[in-house]
Image: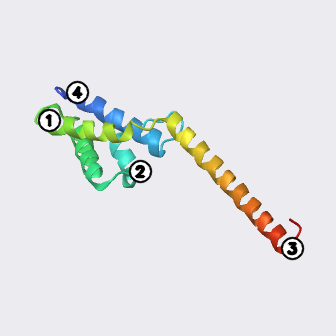
Amino acid sequence: MRQQAKTIDDIRRMADEVAQLMAARFGGARRGEQPPLHEMLRRRGGALPGRLRRQAQRLAEADRLCAQPRVGRQQDMRAVSRAHHALTAHLRPLGEVSRFQDRALHVTASVVLGLLLIGAAAIWLMLRRGTL
């Protein structure tokens, strides 16, 4: 379900959530550290596609402006909510477990391919020498 930003606290919460998702997916944060969104954009913003990078910058700017309550209330809440939804939809599907499983699968596939090539080369050599 899509959440709509209604207050300044919602914008801050959304920015923190996106920053945590970026740190979990792309790295860039030390263990126990929770950097703000503008810091995560500086560190790992290049890993986002261009369209989402602009959305993240919009959300980070809204978070920065929320430090001043009068200016924070003047934000376009729909645009901030759309940016949050687009970013979380992109960053959430792959969790840590899925990324670990993908890495394990890639390593296993590389090892199997290597063994297959070595076996094929051994059979080819044996056929060329006439031992098989």
Badge 4: residue crowd in 10 Å (few <14, some 14–19, many ≥20): few
Tag 1: amino acid: Arg
Per the image, the residue denoted by label 1 is 78
SS type, badge 2: helix
Badge 2 crowding class, 10 Å Cα cut-off, few under 14, some 14 to 19, many 20 or more, is: some
Q: At x 40% / y 37%, what residue is drawn?
A: 93
User: Label 1 crowding class (10 Å Cα cut-off): few <14, some 14-19, many 20+?
Assistant: few
Of the residues under marks 4 and 2, which one precedes in the sequence?
A: 4
**Residue at the (44%, 38%) spot, across then down:** 94
User: Which residue position holds label 2?
Assistant: 44
The structure residue drawn at horizontal position 48% and vertical position 44%, both measured from the top left corner, is 27
Circle 3 is placed at which residue position? 129
Looking at the image, residue 58 lies above or below residue 129: above
Q: Name which of mark 4 and mark 1 comes first in the sequence.
A: 4
Q: Amino acid at mark 3?
A: Arg
Q: Which mark is residue 3?
A: 4
- Camera-side mark, 1 or 3: 3
Query: What's the distance in space between the residues labelled 3 and 2, CA to CA?
Result: 55 Å
